[in-house]
């Protein structure tokens, strides 16, 4: 449709600009990091007096590099495309849970898993992990006062094609239909400083590249379910 066409042209333009800016940011960041290390070693034992400040600077530099990496990945996904392999989605989920364990614990979130999928999907493992982590972290952010995170996989056909569905459901703040209309837009975030607004748009692209899709169902105040569908690896 025309709307989709305009959207994809916009995305291409944003992609070009973003890739340029991200590359430009990488160099000064490397210079700052390098000089910071020099300052620290010149100060020697005295550097300990500014331990907290140094750690803050390190953390923030790390955060900038992470944002830049995300931006580059968003802008030039083809340069980041890895090898695709056959995976059981449930196993990939298990691999990324240790990364979010402390967040689940801190927010007092109960995890329920129901895995019945027997089929395998074709995707780059790191990318599938990244999508799962994005959705899980979003679910955790949606439950600041605790709740239940349900992750399930099951064999599911879509338009006559065999595949696997991976559902990630939270009992969090939920979303209005209007909000849902915006969440896959690049840079759209309701998280101010904390968010980049790139998680869902990158996830959607990575999944679409493997011939799959992401759908969302939500009720304000009740919770949200993101469902990923991927075709079965033949
Ligand atoms: P970010 O997390 O950096 O904001 P995303 O693209 O991952 O970027 O998400 C965009 C927005 O979608 C979030 O800012 C939030 O408003 C909304 N969102 C995503 N997942 C959920 C969820 N599980 N529950 C409620 N809102 C969500």
Image (cartoon, rainbow, N blue to C red):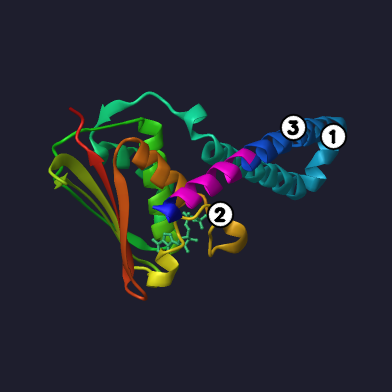
Circles 1 and 2: CB atoms closer than 8 Å: no
Q: Is residue 230 visible?
A: yes
Ligand 1 contact, mark 2 (Cβ < 8 Å): no
Q: CA distance from mark 1 to mark 3?
A: 19 Å
Camera-side residue: 166 or 179? Answer: 179
Vertical placement of residue 39 versus 158, above or below: above
Vertical placement of residue 205 versus 35, above or below: below
Residue 10: in magenta span: yes
Q: Which residues are magenta?
A: 5-16
Vertical placement of residue 142 versus 127, above or below: below
Ligand 1 contact, mark 1 (Cβ < 8 Å): no
Camera-side residue: 129 or 99? Answer: 129
Q: Position of residue 200 (x, y in %)?
A: 44, 51
Residue designated by label 3: 27
Residue designated by label 1: 39
Residue 145: in magenta span: no
Would residue 1 appear left or right of 113 to someone viewing this image?
Answer: right
Q: Who comes first in sequence, dot 2 or dot 3?
A: 3
Count the marks.
3
């Amino acid at each position: 449709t025309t709307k989709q066409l305009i959207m994809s042209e916009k995305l291409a333009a944003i992609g070009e600009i973003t890739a340029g800016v991200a590359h430009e940011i990488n160099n000064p960041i490397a210079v700052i990091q390098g000089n910071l290390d020099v300052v620290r070693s010149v100060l020697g034992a005295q550097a300990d007096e500014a331990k907290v400040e140094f750690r803050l600077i390190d953390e923030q530099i790390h955060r900038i590099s992470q944002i830049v990496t995300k931006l580059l990945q968003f802008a030039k996904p083809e340069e980041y495309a890895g090898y695709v392999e056959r995976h059981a989605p449930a196993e990939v989920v298990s691999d990324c849970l240790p990364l979010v364990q402390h967040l689940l614990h801190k927010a007092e979130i109960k995890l329920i898993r129901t895995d019945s999928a027997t089929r395998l999907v074709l995707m780059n493992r790191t990318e599938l992990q990244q999508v799962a982590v994005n959705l899980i972290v979003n679910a955790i952010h949606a439950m600041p006062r605790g709740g239940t995170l349900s992750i399930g996989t099951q064999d599911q056909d879509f338009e006559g094609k065999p595949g696997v569905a991976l559902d990630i459901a939270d009992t969090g703040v939920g979303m209005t239909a209007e909000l849902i209309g915006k969440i896959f837009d690049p840079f759209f975030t309701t998280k101010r400083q904390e968010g980049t607004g790139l998680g869902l748009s990158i996830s959607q692209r990575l999944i679409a590249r493997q011939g799959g899709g992401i759908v969302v169902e939500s009720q304000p105040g009740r919770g949200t379910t993101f469902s990923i569908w991927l075709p079965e690896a033949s």
